[in-house]
Image: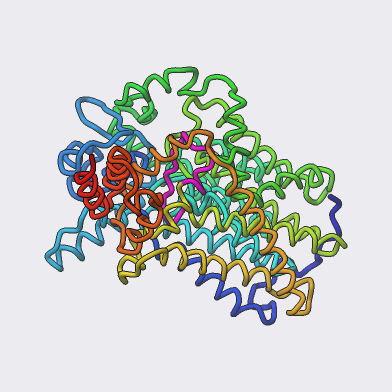
Amino acid sequence: MMFGRSGGNSAYRSPGERTGHGPVVALIALAVAFTWLTSSPYHNDLNNPNENVRVYTARALVEHGTFAIDEVCDEWGYVNDKATYDGRLYAGKAPGSAYLAVPAYAAWRLVSNALDREPSKREWVQVCRLGSSTIPTLLLLGFFAAWALRRCDDPGSGAMVVVALSLGSLVFSYGLIMTSHSTTAMALVTALILLEQHLREPERSSPLLLAGFALGWAVALEYPAALGAGLIGLYGLYRTPRRVQLVSWITVGAALPIGLVLIFHATCFGGILETPYGHLENPGFIEHHAEGFYGLKRIKWHAVVGSFVSPANGLLWYAPWTAVAIAAIPAGLARKELRLQAVLTLSVLLAYTAFISLVTNWRGGWSAGARYIVPVVPVLAWYLLLVMQAQAKSPDFAMLKGVVATTTLVGVFVCTVSATHFPHYPTELANPVYEIGTFFAFRGYRTWGLTNGLDMGGAASIILALSAAGVAWLGAATMAGRPRHPAERLLAATLCALLAAGAILLQSRVRSPNAEVVDQSRNFIAHIWEPRPTEEAIDVYRLRLPEDIVNGSAPRARVIKYADAAALEGFTETALDLYLRAATLR
């Protein structure tokens, strides 16, 4: 790929200066916010340890004034991912997410007390999610969006990259639950953008102060974020002539979040350098972390393949637009004005690739995409925006924009299905997005959130989510830019949508080799699904029954088999009908 000339002096005009696209930007923002805020998938019996142990810590801090979660475990039951020290139990995680959740939890406690009601565990989890993950990540996405629309001469390119990051990436996959991946990733790219701002305005110290705060919070959220934070810090250090100023202000900015981490260490584990990893409770986790350096042992190429290209977990499967950014790195290295940005992007990519290849438990349990490399995603979005800006005057810009739009729409579909319905895919399946995600989403299984609150049945929740996400994508695809004529832009968007639909159809054709494993996974998930199936879901389930079961010609053993399966999935009325029928057969 050869880059055309950059777009000149307009790179930092405010979005409002770009005539005519303000309403479309507002529509995209509303569509993104709607998609993020109207669904909150929760399945209590899954007992997701990665999320729950953080919620337990937030509850312990507010209700009991301690990091120790013993009392919360007594109230809410067993949870994994714990650490232990001096006879007490603590979260085996960095404390940043729990700290962020405390204000939201405390505020909801005051409201609940005023209303004389005690929220359910589900409600507390959802409050903590909003305070620690969903709202902070959305705010940081807003900061990224403002930068992207200022930075790129073609507003449609900036908007498309924003849609790719916010709705078509792993940032969305993990943004609705209380894991730290999305917030960490956005904190890192926020620091990067702030460093770039300092390079443009070196006399200002506030961008450096805020960048230090963002880098510090990233590490407070996830210890491995030190990889990305270190590389971003080195990038800023190399590019600025004011190195002492940069180091000083970043250090000051990072002092608060890092100080809170050290307080957590000293309070819970007896020393500021004592992390939860050195005091894990689970014997299996202890074994994992005992190998090599805290679980980092030897390179596993199957982990690299699984994390990047596998339909089960791969980054390129969930967010195929990232392949465009990765493919553009060599051309960026050859171009002087993009060389340093390409070096940083490549460095972050290689660092997290090495990390995921060394981690013993590289899948990290049930997950919707490679969760340990989520911090790579916003950096790739940042670099892709710079590439599109560099290409804005070249003859092949329309082709590049079309490829980005098409691959973004595929990612929007995959990640919206995953994020809004069941972001905990079993590790045994070859293509869980379609074997689990679309299977349940389009069979009447709704989620907690707007559709459940309004008692909307059937597949309303996934239809609303995909519709809102589609509006955001279409808005970006038809924004002012090349081609200029609205009809041409609409035609180009339609072509991209058709190509994306074809790619989605091809993705859905991948199947796990063992159908029995798929059935077992579906039966388990159906059994723990919340909220329970609607009447429409029950009707759909009946339509899925084989013809011999429906017409009564099946033998007794086969009827009992399907009755057992219906009972396991939670369709008790159907199961009872089948058991009664089986009782009449010999």
- Residue 21: give x, y in percent of width and height: 65, 78
Q: Quadrant of residue 113?
A: bottom left
* 115 or 571, nearer to the observer: 571
* 309 or 111, nearer to the observer: 309
Task: Using residue 52 as the reference point, say whether residue 398 is left or right of it.
Answer: right
* 281 or 170, nearer to the observer: 170
Q: Quadrant of residue 155?
A: bottom right
- The residue positioned 80% from the left and 60% from the top of the image is 399
On whether residue 4 falls in the magenta region, the answer is: no
- Residue 469: give x, y in percent of width and height: 53, 65
- Residue 432: give x, y in percent of width and height: 49, 44
* 458 or 462, nearer to the observer: 458
Task: Using residue 147 as the reference point, say whether residue 454 is left or right of it.
Answer: left
On whether residue 429 falls in the magenta region, the answer is: yes
- Residue 123: give x, y in percent of width and height: 26, 57
Magenta span of residues = 418-435
- The residue positioned 35% from the left and 54% from the top of the image is 551
Task: Using residue 191 as the reference point, say whether residue 498 is left or right of it.
Answer: right
> With respect to residue 93, does 175 lie above or below?
below
The quadrant of the rendering that contains the C terminus is: top left
Q: Residue furthest bottom?
A: 20
> With respect to residue 312, does 269 lie above or below?
above
* Residue 445 visible, this angle: yes
